[in-house]
Amino acid sequence: MKRRDFLATTTLAGVVSVLSESCNTAQTNTNTAAATPTPFADHFELNEVSISELQQKIKGNQYNAQELVKTYLERIDQIDKKGPAINSIIEVNPDAMDIARKLDEELKAGKSRGPLHGVPVVIKDNIDTADKMKTSAGSLALANSVAPKDSFVAQKLREAGAIIIAKTNLSEWANIRSSHSTSGWSGRGGLTKNPYALDRNACGSSSGTGAAIAANLAIAGIGTETDGSIVCPSTHNSLVGIKPTVGLISRSGIIPISHSQDTAGPMTRNVTDAAILLGALTGIDPRDTATNASQGKSYTDYTKFLDAKGLNGMRIGVARNFFGINERTDKLITDAIDVMKKNGAVIIDPADIAHTNEYDESEILLYELKADLNAYLATLGPGAAVKTLKDIIDFNEQNRDTELKHFGQDLFIKAQEKGPLTDKAYLDALAKNQRLSRAEGIDAIMDKEKLDAMIAPSGGTAWLTDLINGDHFSGGYSSPSAVAGYPHITVPAGYIHGLPIGLSIFGRAWSEPVLIKIAYAYEQATQHRRRPEFLATANLNA
C-alpha cells in the first residue's frame, strides 16, 4: 500500500507530488559535481542465473540443492549482512540445509518435483511458514510469532520442491501503519537499501524481496501487494513483478490488509522465471473462497504463453493519464512504445482510464484492515502477544522508542475507529470503487478500443530515503488495477542515472496469459535488465 493513495483524495495531492519531486531534484542537484561512485567488486558465480540455467547445472552435477543453499546463505552473509549491507533479509531458515538434503535424495531416486526442485527462494515476512521462522510483518508485536500452519503459498512452494531459504524485510505491516512512513523500514528488520544506489529507497512494501532478488541473494522471491507493493519494488530493483488477478493465488496464511485487493505474486529477474513461479502458486484453496473464481481460468504452467513474437498483432492502449512523472521517464516509455510498434503491435494512443481520481480506496482499506487483521490474529491461538488491532496500537505506544521512533500509526488508529463490514459507508464505497475501476474504468476503455492490454510507466526513479519526512512518491501506475483486482506486470524499461525504470503492462481480470506473452516479447526485444553495482549513491554521470 502506498500513502500517496490516501493523499490522492485531498486537494493537496498535486502540491505534495510536486514538492516531493522538487525535493528529490534539489537533493540530486547538490551532488552533480561528485565523482562517479565506485561499484562494489561482485564476482558471484551465480549472478543473474535463471531457473532453467540452474536446473541445467543441477542435472550436470555442477550443484546439488545442499550446495546451492550453502552458496546462497554465504551470499546473504557477504552482501546482505556485510559488504554493501542492503539488509533485505529479516531471517534465514535454519532448516534449509535439511530440506535441501531430502530434495537431493529424491532426485537421486529419480523423482523431480519440476522446475523448482532444489531452487532457493525467499518470501516476504508476512507469509506464514509453520517452521522455525517467525511471521511478523516486520513488527515487534509479532517478533516471536510462529504460524500454526503453512500459508497456501508456502505449501505450494514446498510441494514444487522450492527451498524457502529466508524471509525478507518489508515496510512494516505492509506499509499500512502510517501515512508518513518510510518504505522498506520495519521495527523488527530496520531499513532495507536499494542495491542500485544504497542511499535510495527500495520501495515498499515488498522492499526486501525486491532488493534480495536484484542482488542475487536467491533465484526468485514472493512479494505481496495491496496497491503497488509488488510492482513498485520490482521497478525500483529492475525486476519483473506480477501482481495477479485477486483470487488467482490464495491469501490464506498471509497477514492481511484488504481481502478485496490483497494478493501475493512473483518477483524475479526475468519473465520466464516469473511465469514458472506463478504457475506453481495457483490452485483452489478452501481457506480462501476468492480462489473459487479462478476455476477454469488459471494454469499450472504459464511458460506455454512465452512467445518472442508475442507483440505481433496485439492492440495495446497507452494510458497517458499516468505519464508526466518527468521527461526522462516519459522518454523511456516512449522508447518502449516504439519497440512494440517495430515488433508488430498496434498502438492506440491515448487510451486513458476514466475516474482514476474518484476512488474511495482509503475508506475500503481502513475498514477491511480492521476486520481482516483481527481475523488473522485470531488464528494465532491463545499464546499470541497481540490478539486485535487495538492490542497492536497499544503495544506500539508502549514501545514508542523502538516502534514509533521514525513515524506514527495514524492509519491504524483510523482503522480502529471504523465499524463492521456491514456499514453502509463501506458497502457503498466498495461498490463505487469496483464499478469505477472495472466496468467504467479498465473494461470500458479496453472495450471501446478493442484492446488486448494497456501500458503505462510503473513509476519514477527511486527517491532518496528520508527517515525524517517519509517517502517521496512522484507518480506511476498501480491503483486502477489494484482497486479492480485485475492483473498487472512490470518489466524493466531502462535506467536514469543507473536507477531502474519499469514498464507496466495490465488488462482485464484473468488476462495473465496475454500480459505474460506481451511482457516476454518486450523483454526479449530489449534485454534491459542489468544487475546492480551496490553504489553508495546514484551515478549522475551515467
Image: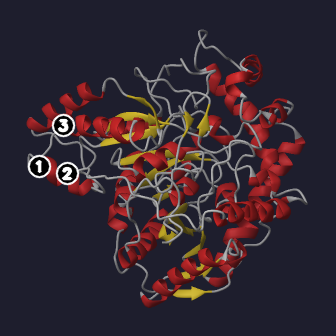
Identify residue for label 3. 67
Disc 3/disc 1 C-alpha distance (Å): 13 Å
Image location (x, y in percent) of residue 422: 83, 36
Sort mark 1 into few (<14), some (14-19) or many (20+) by Cα contacts within 10 Å. few
The reply to whether the C-beta atoms of the residues labelled 2 and 1 are less than 8 Å apart is yes
Quick check: 539 above or below 217?
below
92 or 111: which is nearer to us?
92
How many marks do you count on the picture? 3
Question: Quick one: label 2 or label 3, which is nearer the N terminus?
Answer: 2
Image location (x, y in percent) of residue 505: 54, 69
Image location (x, y in percent) of residue 74: 28, 36
Identify residue for label 2. 55
Q: Amino acid at mark 1?
A: Lys
Q: Image quarter for residue 305?
A: bottom left
Quick check: 436 above or below 109?
below
Kind of element beneath mark 1: helix
Sort mark 3 into few (<14), some (14-19) or many (20+) by Cα contacts within 10 Å. some
The reply to whether the C-beta atoms of the residues labelled 3 and 1 are less than 8 Å apart is no
Evaluate whether residue 258 shows in this view: no
Q: Amino acid at mark 3?
A: Glu
Question: Quick one: label 3 or label 1, which is nearer the N terminus?
Answer: 1
Which numbered tag is attached to residue 46?
none
The reply to whether the C-beta atoms of the residues labelled 2 and 3 are less than 8 Å apart is no
Identify residue for label 1. 59
Instruction: Identify the residue shown where x is 83% and y is 64%.
Output: 14
